[in-house]
Image: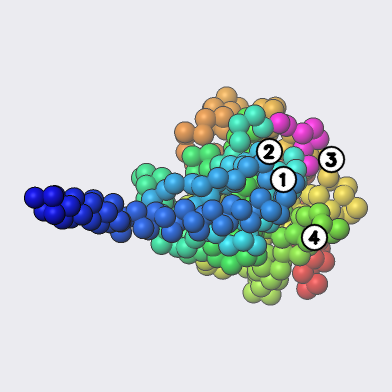
Amino acid sequence: MKYFSRILLIVVLSLVGCESDKTSPEDSRAGRINMYTGVIIDYLHEQNLPELESVEPWENDYGPGVKLVTAHYEIFSTLLDRKMLSEIPHFIESAYQAYNSQLPRQVSTSTKFRIYLLEDRTQWEHFTWAFAGEQAEMFCKIKAGAYYHNDACVAYDIGHDRTMSALGHEGWHQFSSRHFKYRLPSWLDEGVAMLFESYRIKNGIIVFDPSRNTYRIDALREAMLNNNMIPLRELTAINPGQVLATDQTEGVMAFYSQSYALVRFLREANSGRLFDTYQQLLADGLWGNWPLDEISKQIAVDRNLPRTILWNHLVGTQLFQQYVHEDFECIEQEYLAFCRLITQY
């Protein structure tokens, strides 16, 4: 009887042991994910990155992820490339300072901006369908890039330089949308955003340098060679809308490259003759001091109202004439000369 009891006890213990050793596929995958993100987190801690306040796992439905926190940003990333993750905190905080440098007086951000950086196109599209609601279909037409929506920048890995360029560009839209009382006309908003698409590193410091933006310069040269330059009066009135951001036609490329050149013209031409005008134009948009009619003011303030073609046409040209020059034809030649200068055409 005692022998039988010992056998029964061994069997029971064996069964208990076998039961405790069983691991579900989900638990195994979660363990691998936690281990992988743990390695990345340890690596980032070891780098002692000055701008990185904290890093922790980010649980999401798309893949292993981490959350990086800086002074002004929260970056949620399933892109776990060590080089990118170690560079982004410095890059995005440098961009924030560069955005502020466009203004005569800096503004402060109390709530951190959000950035979502997905590993690949598939994750990005899945995230977009869950995040962007009825606008998801439109965003998913973007061939390669990023978008700003609902106070967040959403990007995916399109290569190191292009991803950084997209973050710099969309980050301006994020910054201006939150801080500016008036929304900017398209030529100005896109033109300023393109100032942050290219940069160089000098003594460990990121310096945004629009003169290195060969993508926009090449497109501008192409527009000049093919006689596709848009007259200034039309350029300041264009509302590219959502279609222009996704349709890479010659006209679209001309709009973006010329808007890039126009903002550079205001900042740089003739030793910065119009730089104070440029800053005042932005500052008055920031504080709500543009001389607009009441209906235009209402549309400029309320981001829930669409920026219609008519509003962009009226306000875009009106602001240019009031702040820069009332005679488009007169200043056009000066602008074209600047375009030839920067393209070496």
Q: Earlier in the sequence, mark 1 or mark 3?
A: 1
Quickly name the residue at label 3.
276
* Structural distance between the alpha carbons of marks 4 and 2: 21 Å
Mark 1–mark 2 CB contact (< 8 Å): yes
Quickly name the residue at label 2.
71
Asked whether residue 121 is in view, the answer is: yes
Quadrant of the rendered image containing residue 113: top right
**Quarter that holds the C terminus:** bottom right
Dot label at residue 209: none
SS category of the residue bearing label 3: helix
Name the amino acid type tagged 4. Ile
Asked whether residue 155 is in view, the answer is: no
Q: Earlier in the sequence, mark 4 or mark 1?
A: 1
Q: Nearer the viewer, mark 2 or mark 3?
A: 2
- Magenta stretch holds residue 229: no
Quadrant of the rendered image containing residue 228: bottom right
Q: Give the residue drawn at x 68%, y 56%.
A: 87
Quickly name the residue at label 4.
201
Q: Earlier in the sequence, mark 4 or mark 3?
A: 4
Name the amino acid type tagged 2. Ala
Read off the magenta span: 101-108
Quadrant of the rendered image containing residue 203: bottom right
Q: Position of residue 291 (x, y in %)?
A: 68, 29
SS category of the residue bearing label 4: strand
Mark 4–mark 3 CB contact (< 8 Å): no
Name the amino acid type tagged 1. Glu
Compared to 294, does 243 lie above or below?
A: below
Quickly name the residue at label 1.
51
Name the amino acid type tagged 3. Asp
* Structural distance between the alpha carbons of marks 4 and 3: 27 Å
Q: Give the residue drawn at x 91%, y 53%.
A: 271
Mark 3 Cα shell of 10 Å, populated few (<14), some (14-19), many (≥20)? some
